[in-house]
Each structure stands twice: as structure tokens, then as C-alpha cells.
Amino acid sequence: MPLHLEIVTTERVVFSGEVDMVTVPGSGGVMGVLPHHAPVLSTLRPGELRVKIGNEVYEYAIGGGFVDIHDNRVIILADSAERADEIDIARAEAARRRAEEMLKNPPASKEDLFQIEAALKRSRVRLQVARRYHRQYGSESS
């Protein structure tokens, strides 16, 4: 019996369908989810989400969020989520450079510093996922 997976952001349903396995970047570490997994409600950190369907593995860059696992259903409520083939490498690289530049002169407020560090983490994850995809499937002109 496969898992039913939904990956949802505030903007759209990124994926909805049957899968064989999901690997999520949980706040306590990477967690693999197979059918009949114990119920779990957990936060997610920015990272790579992997979805296995048959012999294919699909990768997504997520910006954190929540995962709810119960009754062979996995619901990902992500702050942001992009399939590897959707990521514009040039844009992600520009976002990484902007965040690194901002960190050279740290802001006065801890909240602003947290926002910049989170943006840097998201851009690094996006670059990692996109570059792996483009090495495997083609050029970086996405």
C-alpha cells in the first residue's frame, strides 16, 4: 500500500499523489517515511525533500514548515517548496550573495539577523537541489 503525499504552500499545491517513500528534513534530523509509519507531527527545517515513486526519485527544496504523518498519508505544509527543475540557479545564486553581503554588516535587531540567516539557508538548499538536478539531467540554464 503506497503513501498519499501532499506538499502544500500558501500559494499552491506543489504535489498530490501516491508515492512509495518520502524523506523529509525534520527538525531533529532527516526522517524516512514508508507505508505504515507511526503517526508523527513535526516541524521541518529548510532542506531537501525526496519523493520516491517506483524507481524514480524527485527532489524538492523546502523552506521549512510542518509534516503530519498518519494513516498512510503524509501532509507537508511548507513555508516554500520548489521542484528541482523549477529552481532558477541564477536567481538562487543572487539571493545567496545578497544574504552573505547583508551578514557582513549584521543588523542591529536579532529578528533581522534571523531573517537574513534563514534566507541564506533557503538559497543554499535551493542551489544544492538545483545543481544536483542539472548535473544529472542537463544544463544549468534553468
Image (spheres, rainbow, N blue to C red):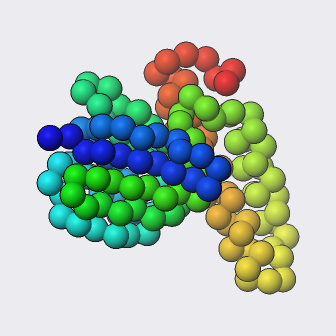
Is 17 drawn above or below residue 103 in the view shown? above
Is 15 drawn above or below residue 133 in the view shown? below
Extreme residue in the bottom direction: 109
Q: Nearer the viewer, residue 39 or 113?
A: 39
Is 126 drawn above or below residue 37 in the view shown? above
Looking at the rendered structure, the number of numbered marks drawn on it comes to 0
Looking at the picture, how far across and down is residue 66, in whole percent? Answer: 45, 64
> Which residue appears at 67% of the width and 24% of the height?
142
Q: Is residue 103 left or right of residue 126?
A: right
Quadrant (top left, top right, bottom left, bottom right) of the N terminus: top left
> Which residue appears at 59% of the width and 46% of the height?
12
> Which residue appears at 56% of the width and 28% of the height?
85
Q: Nearer the viewer, residue 52 or 68?
A: 68
> Which residue appears at 42% of the width and 41% of the height?
16
For residue 113, which quarter of the picture?
A: bottom right
**Residue 46 seen in render:** no
**Residue 56 seen in render:** yes
Looking at the picture, how far across and down is residue 108, in whole percent? Answer: 84, 83
Looking at the picture, how far across and down is residue 19, in whole percent? Answer: 29, 38
